[in-house]
Amino acid sequence: MKIIVYIATSIDGYIADEDGSIEWLNTIPNPSNDDLGWSDFINSIDAIVMGKNTFDKVLSFNIDWPYPVPVFVLSNSMVTAPNGYKDKIKIINGNPKEIACFLKKQGFNNVYIDGGKTVQQFLNDDLIDELTITKIPILLGGGIPLFSEHGNQMAFELVETKVLINQLVKIRYERKRNCP
C-alpha cells in the first residue's frame, strides 16, 4: 500500500495562515480554470484519511462533496458522521500505524493523507511513501506549517517537477528506503 500526501504550501512552508484560513490559495489567477492535475491525482487513489479539522474545512466550502472515494475522518471527538455525510465518511481513530494496517487489510492500495496534523503524525511514524507539494508564490510569515520537528532524518527522491500556470511549482518526491 502506498501512502501519499498531495498538498499546497506557501513558499515558507505553511498550509494555512495564522487564522487557519486557506484563502491565500486563491491569490494566483487561473485563467484557464485548469484543475492543475487534481483530477488525475484523485482518480489515482482509492481512499482518503483526513483529520477532523480538514473535514470541517471541507464542509465550510459549501460545495458538493468533492471525493469519489471512501473518506476516513480521523477523530477522537466525533462519534457519528454529521447528517448528510453518513454515506460519505467513516470515522476512525488510532495511531497512524494502526490506521495504515487497517486500510491495508481493507484492500486499499493508494491512500491520500490530508490535513496538517494528520500528515505530521504519519510522517512521525515514517509511513509517507510519496509527497506532492505545490508551492504557491506567497510568504505567509506564519501559520500552520506542513512539517514539524519529528526527530528523524528521512530521505526522499525527486521524481517530478512541473511549473503550473507560470506561477506554481508542483514537486513530487518518493521516499527512499534502505532495503536489506
Image: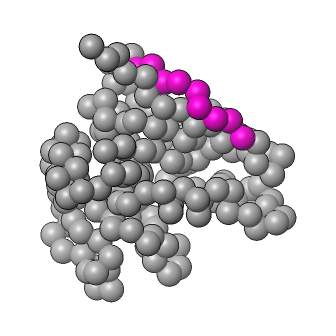
Q: Residue at x 23, y 46 (%)?
A: 100
Q: Is residue 171 above or below residue 88?
A: above
The span shown in magenta is: 154-162
Question: If the image is split into quadrants, where does the N terminus sit?
Answer: top left
**Is residue 173 shown left or right of residue 102?**
right
**Is residue 121 shown left or right of residue 165?**
left
User: What residue occupies the far top of the structure in this picture?
Assistant: 180
User: What residue occupies the far front of the structure in this picture?
Assistant: 180
Q: Residue at x 49, y 38 (%)?
A: 131
**Residue 121 screen position, x and y as percent:** 30, 38
Quarter holding residue 2: top left
**Is residue 19 shown left or right of residue 36?**
left
Q: Residue at x 80, y 59 (%)?
A: 29
**Does residue 85 appear anywhere in the picture?**
yes
**Residue 74 screen position, x and y as percent:** 26, 56
Question: If the image is split into quadrants, where does the C terminus sit?
Answer: top left
Q: Is residue 55 above or below residue 24?
A: below
Quarter holding residue 22: bottom right
Q: Is residue 160 magenta?
A: yes
Quarter holding residue 135: top right
**Residue 71 screen position, x and y as percent:** 33, 65
- The secondary structure making up most of the magenta span is strand
Considering depth in this image, is 27 or 153 the residue closer to the camera? 153
